[in-house]
Image: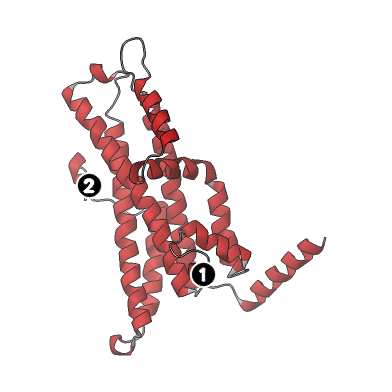
Amino acid sequence: MLRALFGEPPRQETGELQKANQAIREYLERLATVPSPKQSPRERKFIIWCQSFLRAIDELEQSQYAAAQYGRRVSSPYIDQMTAEEHMNYHRHVYFYKNAIIRLFAILDKLGYFMNERFELRTERIKTRFSYFTVLRNMHENGLYRDLEEMLYELKMKHKEPMTRLRNQRNTEIHTINADLLDDLMEAEQAKFGDRTRLETEDIERNMRDLDEGCLMTFQAVATAFRYLVHPPAAEEQKAREQAREKGKRS
């Protein structure tokens, strides 16, 4: 949809986005094998949830793409050197960048709530309003679906640093600013290059690298969870992994 803003054809699904969509659709197909009149309220809820996931990850990718496109159109190192068009492109970049961050964590939390419901993890006993990361902690501490938890935990640790930076930016954007954070922001705002306010275009590139990693982790986490639902590990394989874990603990 947003590619039309840049005179480009609609997106062709590739890479991790395609894998995530395929995993969701495969699970949807499995749910659809039960005729509608015979579907339980729980199954119908999962169907609606899956459709919501498809829309959500599509909207995330589009925001990521638009943020990158507008970011590439900003080259002036000083705000007062920008042309009117470049200034507008900068604000468009910031809009889609912030939008993507908010959507990214919304999808992860949606995934956490879905997993909590589908696998009956009861994370609400730990925290009434929980996040995706709370769900992972609950799975780890209580030994729930260990194979799935280990795969998701590996993704979390692999992308930990950029995700932490993105989460801090998300919190700044949507939560009340505390005194310390306000001081930091005011100090950054007052930073000058001579008597001119400097816009670090490198910040755009650095932020986009973090966003790209965050989107990658999100698409992979969604794909991992839904693939697990469709293709759970065989009982023999699961038992072998459990034995290997126990042996590792004793050694």
Q: Amino acid at mark 1?
A: Arg
- The residue at which mark 2 appears reads as 2
Rendered location of residue 176, percent (x, y): 36, 44
Q: Residue furthest right?
A: 251
Q: Residue at x 40, y 52 (%)?
A: 105
Task: Place residue 32 in its image quadrant.
Answer: bottom left
Q: Residue furthest top?
A: 194
* Mark 1 or 2, nearer chain start: 2
Labels 1, 2: front one: 1
**Number of callouts in the render?**
2
Q: Is residue 196 left or right of residue 183?
A: left
Residue in the foreground of this view, choosing between 142 and 119 = 142
Secondary structure type for disc 1: helix
Task: Place residue 49 in its image quadrant.
Answer: bottom left
Q: Which mark is residue 155?
A: none
Q: Residue at x 35, y 49 (%)?
A: 102
- The residue at which mark 1 appears reads as 125
Can I make out residue 72 in this image?
yes
